[in-house]
């Protein structure tokens, strides 16, 4: 299988700065590191991201990669990166630790780690997004097991240091190659990187140290929130590991479409149907808004597509910067069913010049239309 482009792996542009490369790798490492993410394929994604960073994070290697691609100079490739990280001063664990507090030293597998963030999608009615609301949601989340206090061990027993990795959480193998000494580091499969094994597991959590529970959380939806925006609720994500802080909860907003209103930012749009007589003679009509009904004066001679602005009748800005407007777009409705009397009156109107426009622009259009037949 061909390798993915390193820039694509880290989700950055080719001209990204060193800081942007480092930031992108930090994000990937935090998400896919095997000690944090136990999902299938996470370790492979972490290795792929680390390989990309080790090339793009080095000016010389990045220049060679930009020129030769994965083949490397003289077709030698960037040996040692893909199969398990060459030892350029540390390998997997050390670079991860350099970003997250290890300072280049081997990370303690029993050190406190922040819990994972959670995401919840909330669907709101159109008016709920305009005015906001307070509500409670129920989410499944991992909580520290009360039976074993998070140790994963049966009450009365304790976890023991893993004899295979001696508590390091990693297993190292060294190999001499024509390019130098290569150190392959991988997560210890005996203890899954924790550095400890549990001889007698807790019956409640099965040795995980956490149990899944439904948790009720109170959410304040601010007025003016819109489709796709998020609300961050600090500390309401997954519980931390080894006494670390919990993650955050991110509530993603979806808004149901409205039958009459459409929204663009803080402004609301709607169509106002008018008949011939109302548009030609003028009228005063009742227009619905999310804030209640208002009266709108329609001047005589109003054309289809004319827009009227109702100031302050839109959505409030979610950050408190004022209020949007409602824009009312006129739509002239042509009747599909007419009585005999209505037809008679329209024919009479047409005979006395009703088909001639009194608007200069419209008159010019009618004249050009007539000239097309000459």
Image (cartoon, rainbow, N blue to C red):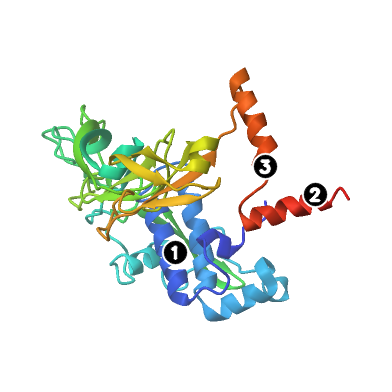
Towards the viewer: 2 or 372: 372
Q: Earlier in the sequence, mark 2 or mark 1?
A: 1
Q: Residue lying furthest bottom in this view?
A: 60
At a point 54% along the width and 71% down the height, the residue shown is 55
Towards the viewer: 8 or 96: 8
At a point 37% along the width and 44% down the height, the residue shown is 296
3 or 2: mark nearer the eye: 3
Q: Earlier in the sequence, mark 3 or mark 2?
A: 3
1 or 3: mark nearer the eye: 3
Give coordinates of residue 332: x percent, y percent. Answer: 55, 39
Task: For label 2, count other residues whose C-alpha is less than 10 Å away and answer few (under 14), some (14-19) or many (20+).
Answer: few
Q: Residue lying furthest top in this view?
A: 340
Left or right of 251 on screen, residue 362: right
Give coordinates of residue 255: x percent, y percent. Answer: 38, 39
At a point 89% along the width and 50% down the height, the residue shown is 374
The circle on residue 353 is 3
Task: For label 3, count other residues whose C-alpha is less than 10 Å away and answer few (under 14), some (14-19) or many (20+).
Answer: few
What residue sits right under mark 2 in the picture? Answer: 370
What residue sits right under mark 1 in the picture? Answer: 25
Task: For label 1, count other residues whose C-alpha is less than 10 Å away and answer few (under 14), some (14-19) or many (20+).
Answer: many
Q: CA distance from mark 3 to mark 2?
A: 15 Å
Q: Is residue 243 above or below residue 287?
A: below
Q: CA distance from mark 1 to mark 3?
A: 75 Å
């Amino acid at each position: 299988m061909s390798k993915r482009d390193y820039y694509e792996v880290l989700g950055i542009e080719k001209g990204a700065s060193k800081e942007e490369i480092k930031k992108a790798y930090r994000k990937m490492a935090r998400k896919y590191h095997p000690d944090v993410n136990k999902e299938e394929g996470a370790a492979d994604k972490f290795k792929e991201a680390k390989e990309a960073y080790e090339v793009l994070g080095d000016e010389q290697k990045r220049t060679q990669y930009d020129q030769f691609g994965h083949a490397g100079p003289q077709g030698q490739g960037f040996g040692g990166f893909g199969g398990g990280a060459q030892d350029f001063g540390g390998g997997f664990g050390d670079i991860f630790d350099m970003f997250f507090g290890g300072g280049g030293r081997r990370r303690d597998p029993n050190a406190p780690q922040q819990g994972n963030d959670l995401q919840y999608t909330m669907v709101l009615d159109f008016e709920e997004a305009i005015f906001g609301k307070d509500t409670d949601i129920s989410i499944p989340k991992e909580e520290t097991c009360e039976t074993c206090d998070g140790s994963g061990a049966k009450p009365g027993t304790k976890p023991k240091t893993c004899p295979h990795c001696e508590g390091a959480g990693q297993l190292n193998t060294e190999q001499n190659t024509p390019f130098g000494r290569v150190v392959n580091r991988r997560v210890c499969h005996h203890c899954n990187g924790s550095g400890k094994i549990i001889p007698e597991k807790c019956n409640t959590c099965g040795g995980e140290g956490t149990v899944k529970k439904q948790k009720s959380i109170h959410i304040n939806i601010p007025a003016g929130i819109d489709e796709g925006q998020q609300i961050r609720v600090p500390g309401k994500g997954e519980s931390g590991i080894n006494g670390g802080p919990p993650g955050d909860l991110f509530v993603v907003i979806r808004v149901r479409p409205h039958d009459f209103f459409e929204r663009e930012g803080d402004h609301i749009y709607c169509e106002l149907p008018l008949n011939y007589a109302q548009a030609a003679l003028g009228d005063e009509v009742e227009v619905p808004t999310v804030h209640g009904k208002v009266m709108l004066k329609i001047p005589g001679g109003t054309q289809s597509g004319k827009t009227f602005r109702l100031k302050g009748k839109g959505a409030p800005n979610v950050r408190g910067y004022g209020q949007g407007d409602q824009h009312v777009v006129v739509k002239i409705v042509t009747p599909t069913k007419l009585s005999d009397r209505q037809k008679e009156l329209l024919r009479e109107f047409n005979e006395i010049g009703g088909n001639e426009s009194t608007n200069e622009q419209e008159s010019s259009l009618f004249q050009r239309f007539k000239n097309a037949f000459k």
